[in-house]
Amino acid sequence: MADTIAFIGAGNMAKSLVGGLLRNGYPAAAIVAADPDASQRAGMAALGVTVVDSNARAVEKAASILLAVKPQVMRSVVQDLKGVLRADQLLISIAAGVPSSALARWSPKDVGIVRCMPNTPALYGAGVTALFANERVTAQQMVVAESILSAAGHVIWVDQESAIDAVTAVSGSGPAYFFYLMEAMIDAGIALGLDAATARTLTLKTAYGAAVMANESASGPAELRRNVTSPGGTTERAISVLDSGQGKSLIERAVREAAQRSVELAKEFAQ
């Protein structure tokens, strides 16, 4: 019989993970979700899993507890599990900016904690999630955590929690960088005379194709770019404009700023 997984919070990311687990064959009877919002519970119940309005009821028989609540309420949620949390249970947090040390301090038991940083494409099963395990997490619990998060896409482990700040900057915030570029390309296409629908289709399909090509090719992005950039051609002209505006340096700065903000948020939430 499958171990019970409890979801605290039944928002979009939690529903995406539950949906992925069910598609992968995890039994609905072994999943329970808690949320104070009746509409959120209804959305989760539609997937066929058990829903409750009490966090304590959700976790009492669970082997793993996935915390899918906003960072601002994480402290009260974890502390309120006093009296029901067991030392053999695993806490998995997908809340941005909340360090495992804070979760351990708030927890009424000395439990294993896995901190995760998924990104929004996980809502479509196309995400990438980095995971960090504290010293209390067993090898079996790592397998469980990976199986849960892999339901929404690719999973990688990091050895140092400090790496989560870089992960947040690169992949957590990363989709927005690509959306920003898509937005600019669509606007440029319209300015050149394309209708909005055509500019959007060309941009999004090109982005998708480039991502597939970069993912499947043995060549790195730099080489793939050079292969497309013929001397004296249109692509070279475009790349020269980006280089003259220090495009790479600007992107690197943006990612560094995102990482720094992740560090700041961790300090704020830890307090």
Image: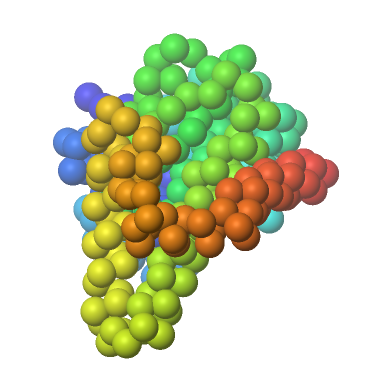
Q: Is residue 62 visible?
A: no
Query: Where's residue 76, x and y in %?
Result: 69, 49
Residue 206 visible in the picture: yes
Q: How many discs appear?
A: 0
Q: Is residue 68 left or right of residue 164?
A: left
Image quarter hosting the N terminus? top left
Q: Relative to 127, is 195 above or below? A: below
Query: Could you tell me which quadrant the C terminus lies in?
Result: top right
Q: How is the image coloured?
A: rainbow
The single residue placed furthest to the right in the displayed view is: 271
Residue at 49% x, 13% y: name it. Answer: 138
- Closest to the observer, 106 or 16: 16
**At x 68% / y 55%, what residue is drawn?**
72
Identity of the residue furthest to the top in this view: 139
Residue at figure coordinates x 26%, y 82% from the top left:
197
Q: Quadrant of residue 101?
A: top right
Q: Say above or below: 259 vs 191.
A: above
Q: Position of residue 75 (x, y in %)?
A: 69, 46
- Tell me which residue sits at (49%, 33%) in the image: 130
Judged left or right of residue 30, residue 23 is left
Q: Is residue 127 left or right of residue 112?
A: left
Task: Judge by depth and name the residue closer to the eye, 142 or 44.
Answer: 142
Measured from the top left, where is residue 85 in percent x and y?
57, 31
- The image position of residue 219, as x and y in percent, is 32, 31
